[in-house]
Amino acid sequence: MSPEEIRTKRELLGETQRAFSKRFGLADGERTVRSWENGEHQPNPTARMILEKLPSKPVFPTSANPRFQFIDLFAGIGGIRAPFQELGGECVFTSEWDKFAQKTYFVNYGEQPHGDITQIDETDIPDHDVLLAGFPCQPFSQAGLQKGFEDTRGTLFFEIARILREKQPAAVLLENVKRFRSHDKGKTYATVKATLEELGYIVRDKVLRAADFGIPQNRERIFIVCFRKNLFEDGETDFNYELPTGPCIPTLVGSILSKDKVDSKYTISDRLYEGHLRRKQEHKKKGNGFGFCTVNALTPYTNTISARYYKDGSEILVEQEEKNPRKLTPEECRKLQGFPDEFVIPVSDTQAYRQFGNSVCVPVVRAVAESMLAVLEDRGVVVPLNGNDDTGTDG
């Protein structure tokens, strides 16, 4: 591996030589990395193996001939972006405040997300056809449905609403936790829906489960799809869109488990395991079903992986023969969220667990994206897959 390749990989990760050296457990840190980049020494076999897995260019470049433009808000590591880009979209703006998620996003998409969306003027955001956002769930200070758009001030949904009012994209996809519908006794969702309608959109929503789309995870999330009313001649009466239903093919956890020997560091300690067992017994005595959960290759699906998975892995522990159960590896988490094999995880295990736990199940988003783009293609917003604005058809 040439010095230039090593330097390029480090720079793509946005790391100093000292930070980069920590990936290899080097005692003398940046001095060794500097010697690699100066061509004075070659990495040892272990370091070379790690280096070869790191990308030297964005893993998922934008299409040279995009069919439509979109923006990606509260972007995380790009789980919602991935299918829309794969289906021919060009991301023209993205925002994510977490610096570790920004790193993962940049390595995979070659784009450094803007930071805090509350500090970005909506007029500075490029025009786009589709707005994507997996936004946080927050209560509203108002009772709701009193002032419409004004009710959303002080919440992160307001950031979406102000961009929609300014840019009026043809379609919107919002994603949130299942309980979003009932959050704050239903006031939160009612205010969001009323605001979207006030801004000129037809709103549809549905709770979709990852296990129904081929991924062995009992992850349920609400997807809210909106289309601008003026795309349809008679408004909502001319609108018959429904969110997709998964094929519901049976799944097995074994499909995401590593076929190779898993490092012992993922096996939970005796102390942690004993704590899990004790708490499970306590819950059982109280008559509730809380407690850790174990799976094996023949288990149909796992519980929902969350951002707190890095703490103790209690929601998903993998059974092992003659050993304590283990946590999923970051690679297994990637598979459990349906990210492609090429997706690079450039951060620590702790950050990887947080990022995948906070992300979306990509195959579910892909199905929603396909259904949305079919409508936009029919309405002339999106260029057909087998054509462009210049080709056209006879008749």
Image (spheres, rainbow, N blue to C red):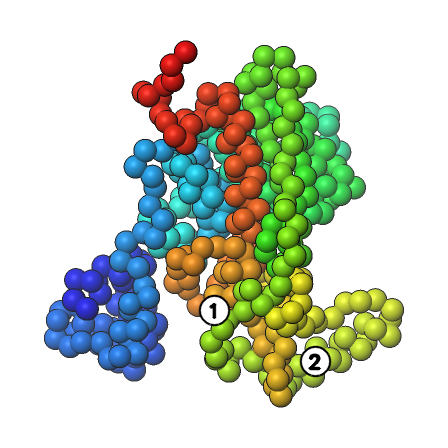
* Crowd band around label 2 with a 10 angstrom C-alpha radius: few (<14), some (14–19), many (20+): few
- Three-letter code, disc 2: Gly
Please tell me whether mark 2 sits on a helix, a strand or a loop. helix
Which of 350 and 235 lies nearest the eye of the viewer?
Answer: 235
Q: Residue at x 53, y 77 (%)?
A: 266
Which of 195 and 134 lies nearest the eye of the viewer?
Answer: 134
* Crowd band around label 1 with a 10 angstrom C-alpha radius: few (<14), some (14–19), many (20+): some
Q: Residue at x 63, y 46 (%)?
A: 247
Query: Considering the image in quadrants, where does the C terminus appear?
Result: top left
- Three-letter code, disc 1: Asp
Relative image position of residue 89 (x, y in whole percent): 41, 36
Residue 137 in view here: no
Query: Considering the image in quadrants, where does the N terminus appear?
Result: bottom left
Relative image position of residue 362 (x, y in whole percent): 52, 49
Return the mark for residue 145: none
Return the mark for residue 275: 2
Asked if the residue under mark 1 is in contact with the one under mark 2, i.e. CB atoms within 8 Å, the reply is no
State which tag comes first along the sequence, 2 or 1: 2
Q: In which quarter of the view is residue 344 placed? A: bottom left
Please tell me whether mark 1 sits on a helix, a strand or a loop. helix
Relative image position of residue 122 (x, y in whole percent): 45, 30
Residue 346 in view here: yes
Q: CA distance from mark 2 to mark 1?
A: 22 Å
Return the mark for residue 349: 1
